[in-house]
Image (cartoon, helix red, strand yellow):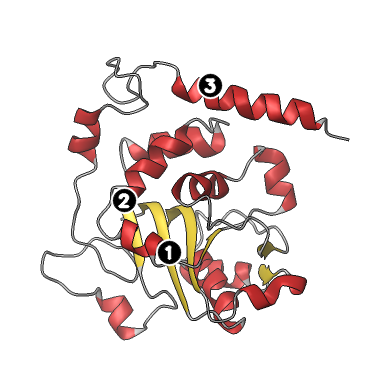
């Protein structure tokens, strides 16, 4: 059985580490934060994006051709940056190298993105994309949940959206294969399904590639009666 006192000490230690002075992960200066203001300004410039899938578009373009042809199940999708240097490295450290201290920096990056604040303010529920039990045991934490708690702690519900089974690694698969992998992967907690009905829901994840995972989760929420589903992600694969 896990020792609750040990869990509290571990959480407090992680918070303390996040406040310690450190070098900027990009330029190696000493700003007492993970990414200095100069690097954030240089590598996180706002850019025109499709409002429903967050893919980069030409200035003045209202929506990408894919979303015009087949409207996605997301009313709004906001991404802070492209999945590229230096953010790809930061997200790899965050997710794959067990460094939860990145959560506050990446959440601030996302909250500072145009349209992110209105989406959060308009939400009734903020739901992190869940991990399977197997993936959670391997990683030790759910990166989407850490982001959600930084972004909207009072609206975040960590147990309403469930991941029913693990899926093979999605990174090398085409969209159709990803969708097939994700069939039946998500569900609403049965005893609390009424919490979704009529609600404006925002999904949180770290990276969006084809959108298959977010769309699968959004479909489950719509079938449960959600009035609207949007998404916020740190990075969007170009």
Camera-side mark, 1 or 3 = 3
Horizontally, residue 107 falls left or right of residue 84, namely: right
**196 above or below 78?**
below
Camera-side mark, 2 or 3 = 3
Q: Quadrant of residue 77?
A: bottom left
Q: Which residue is mark 1?
A: 231
* Residue occupying image coordinates x 34% and y 49%: 111
**10 above or below 43?**
above
Instruction: Tell me if mark 1 has few (under 14), some (14-19) or many (20+) residues whose alpha carbon lies within 10 angstroms of its own.
Output: many
Q: Quadrant of residue 74?
A: bottom left
Are the residues flagged by discs 2 and 3 in contact, CB closer than 8 Å?
Answer: no
> Which circle's residue, 1 or 2, is located before the other in the chain?
2
Instruction: Tell me if mark 3 has few (under 14), some (14-19) or many (20+) residues whose alpha carbon lies within 10 angstroms of its own.
Output: few
Alpha carbon distance from label 1 to label 2:
12 Å
Residue 16's tag is 3
Specify whether residue 191 is in view: yes
Horizontally, residue 36 falls left or right of residue 123, namely: left
Q: Residue furthest right?
A: 1
Q: Which residue is mark 2?
A: 80
* Residue occupying image coordinates x 68% and y 71%: 187
Relative image position of residue 94 (x, y in whole percent) = 50, 35
Instruction: Tell me if mark 2 has few (under 14), some (14-19) or many (20+) residues whose alpha carbon lies within 10 angstroms of its own.
Output: many
Quarter of the picture containing the N terminus is: top right
**190 above or below 21?**
below
């Amino acid at each position: 059985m896990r020792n609750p006192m040990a869990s509290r000490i571990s959480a407090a230690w992680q918070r303390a580490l996040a406040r310690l002075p450190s070098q900027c992960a990009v330029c190696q200066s000493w700003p007492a934060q993970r990414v200095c203001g100069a690097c954030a300004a240089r590598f996180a410039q706002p850019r025109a994006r499709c409002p429903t899938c967050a893919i980069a578009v030409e200035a003045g373009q209202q929506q990408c051709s894919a979303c015009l042809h087949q409207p996605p199940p997301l009313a709004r999708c906001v991404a802070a940056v492209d999945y590229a240097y230096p953010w790809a490295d930061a997200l790899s450290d965050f997710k794959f190298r067990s460094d939860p201290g990145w959560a506050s920096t990446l959440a601030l990056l996302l909250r500072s993105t145009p349209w992110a604040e209105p989406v959060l303010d308009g939400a009734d529920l903020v739901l992190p994309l869940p991990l399977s039990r197997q993936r959670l045991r391997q990683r030790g934490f759910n990166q989407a949940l850490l982001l959600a708690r930084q972004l909207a702690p009072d609206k975040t519900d960590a147990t309403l959206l469930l991941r029913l089974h693990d899926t093979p690694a999605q990174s090398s698969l085409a969209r159709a294969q990803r969708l097939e992998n994700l069939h039946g992967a998500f569900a609403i907690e049965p005893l609390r399904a009424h919490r979704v009905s009529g609600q404006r829901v925002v999904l949180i994840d770290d990276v969006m590639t084809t959108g298959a995972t977010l769309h699968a989760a959004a479909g489950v929420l719509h079938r449960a009666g959600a009035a609207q589903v949007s998404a916020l992600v740190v990075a969007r694969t170009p």
